[in-house]
Amino acid sequence: MTVLAMLAVSLFLYHEFDIKQVLLFLVGAGLGVTLLHAAFGFTGGWRSMIRERRSAGVRAQILLVILTSALFFPVLGHLFPDVGAHAALAPVGISVLVGAFLFGIGMQLGGGCGSGTLFTVGQGQMDMLITLAFFIIGATIGSAHLHWWLALPGLGTLSLIDAYGWFPALVMQVTCLAILYAWSQRMERQRYGRVETLGVLHGGVKVTDRLLFGPWPLWWGVVGLGVLNLLTLLVGGHPWSITFAFGLWGAKIWSALGGDVLAWPYWSTGYPAQALTQSVLADHTSIMDFGIILGAVLAAALAGEFAPAGAPLRWTRILAAVSGGLLLGYGARLAFGCNIGGLVAGMSSGSLHGWLWLLAGFTGTLVGVRFRVLLHLDPPLVRGP
């Protein structure tokens, strides 16, 4: 049924738009499959690092940024002049600092980041629909306030590629990321005496069966997400992003209810103004988000993990989902994206705002993890080496 739905959507997109929309939808579906089969998410990885000093998730994310940087820097550095692709550049300023910090809190309360929210909704986790709904509301409010935040002091856009050239910039970035990778390994080894691998293929399971039905080792997720991100850059002309669509959906809903979103500077000029007048299916980010959800539905069905049984929704979980969703949406708009559009896309584009996002987002996560304890969503933190 899911395959038929994806085929129908693809045919509709080809008829109403063009082959580019079809390809981006299918890339989104591939991302959804990869995210779910590899259980690749930032929220759980960061929380495991903070609570338990387990670093596999964090190390996989570092490797993803290294891979996408290696793929992106030559393209964005115009090594291939015939390829039209744009970097995810954003100003380094208070807006990103505050936004990523709020996002870091929100993803722990809401239970997922941008990509995590989408693929868990596709998996059938209905409590994540609450997070997604308020994610959209928060992103819409953030788009109304963004002009005020951007008026605060900042350094403007700073690109390592523009400043040093793509190869020296890549060497600098990979060196810094390698240091972070070694640090995360050291933290885990200090506590446990060994470091978990990023997944191995056990004997007795065919590679083709593992590919279709999962679960995947984390390093498969790294490779899959990196390659699909490159396809997004080559087909769409920009890195993978997620949360612009949430603000667009919210702005369209608010406009349909009689709100005047054109009075907000964000929606009055440039691409946001254009997207507001078109179908959401014409928007690259929206169509890829829909693809992620359907791809996750397909992967969950193949793995036999659709609509997994969960604990009953307590009022504290609902409160966390509502507040987390609002912080996720508002923070993502201020920070020019979530872990994907702000952090991965920013760093892989050589933009220094991506590094600021990482610092502020992880700091916010430290706070969010403690809020989860206060709401009795997690047991108290255990001190250790």
Image: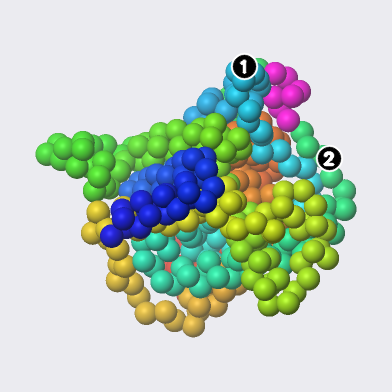
Write down the quadrant of residue 176 in the picture: top right
Magenta span of residues: 159-166
Query: SS for tag 2?
Result: strand
| Mark 1 or 2: the one toward you | 1
Residue 32 shown left or right of residue 271 in the figure: left
| Circles 1 and 2 in contact, beta carbons < 8 Å | no
Q: Is residue 161 visible?
A: yes
Q: Which residue matches tag 2?
A: 155
Residue 160 highlighted magenta (yes or no) = yes
Write down the quadrant of residue 167 in the picture: top right
User: Which class describes the residues within 10 Å of circle 2: few (<14), some (14-19), or many (20+)?
Assistant: few
Q: Residue at x 42, y 49 (%)?
A: 10
* Quadrant of the image containing the N terminus: bottom left
Query: SS for tag 1?
Result: loop
User: Please, which colouring scheme is shown?
Assistant: rainbow
In the rendering, which numbered label is found on residue 79?
1
Q: Residue at x 70, y 71 (%)?
A: 255
Horizontal and vertical percent for residue 32? 41, 50
